[in-house]
Image (spheres, coloured by chain):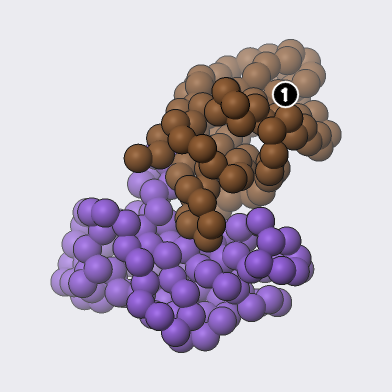
Amino acid sequence: ELKVEQNPLFLSMQEGKNYTIYCNYSTTSDRLYWYRQDPGKSLESLFVLLSNGAVKQEGRLMASLDTKARLSTLHITAAVHDLSATYFCAVVRGGADGLTFGKGTHLIIQP
Amino acid sequence: GAVVSQHPSRVICKSGTSVKIECRSLDFQATTMFWYRQFPKQSLMLMATSNEGSKATYEQGVEKDKFLINHASLTLSTLTVTSAHPEDSSFYICSATVWAYPSPYEQYFGPGTRLTVT
């Protein structure tokens, strides 16, 4: 059974600081996804990581994937209040299967 | 491009009634659609996988007779919650994939439907 673990589950930080969210998964997977969810809203796609060593960046967010360690990270640089949200990583079991999600990281950035 | 819509966005129904939720891919034909459920302050859980013209595949623990899924076309999947009870109250989100344009790997999520059963 595929399990996806995120940590931390809750993070409160100040604007301007850097931090990293970690995502571990238990079995081999083809793809890893990062999503953002605002309260009461659906998911916003951030990154899709497809191969070992993949690194993608968008603004203050950077995601990386180490398939050998079954680990992905989402790094936040110089955080701003607008990045406050819940961040989920998710892994596909293979082929056209649906996603298995981590529990999410609730991020609060204090102005 | 790659827009997925859901209807209704919010529904309140009485216990024992049935509710139908529609998921549409507006500008592409979806190879596969997925249905997820999210309880308050929790993660998303995959309920079922839906392919056009075939029976849905349900995840372990999901009652297929309670959550009826119909995928009548490449752009429409419906989820019917039959004989709804308060414990079925949740946020239901669909997603769609296509093994071509705009991206073979992306999953496009709908805006979600909030179901409240009284």
Q: Residue at x 64, y 68 (%)?
A: B98
Query: In this image, B2 relative to B11: left or right?
Result: right
In percent of the image, x 70 and y 23: which residue is there? A75
Residue at 40% from the left image edge and 80% from the top image edge: B54
> Which residue is denoted by mark 1 in the rendering?
A76
Q: Residue at x 22, y 63 (%)?
A: B63
Chain of the residue where label 1 is placed in the rendered structure:
A
Residue B10 seen in this snapshot: no
The kind of secondary structure element at disc 1 is: strand
Chain B, which colour? purple
Shown in brown, the chain is A
Q: Amino acid at mark 1?
A: Ile
Quarter of the image where the N terminus of chain B is located: bottom right
User: On the picture, is B117 further left or further right than B52?
Assistant: left
Relative to residue B82, is residue B111 depicted above or below?
Answer: above
Place of residue A26 in the rendered image (x, y in percent of width and height, measured from the top left): 44, 31
Q: Quadrant of residue B3?
A: bottom right
Residue A110 in the image, given as x and y percentages of width and height: 66, 19
Residue B60: image location, x then y, percent: 26, 54
Depth check, front residue: B115 or A67: A67
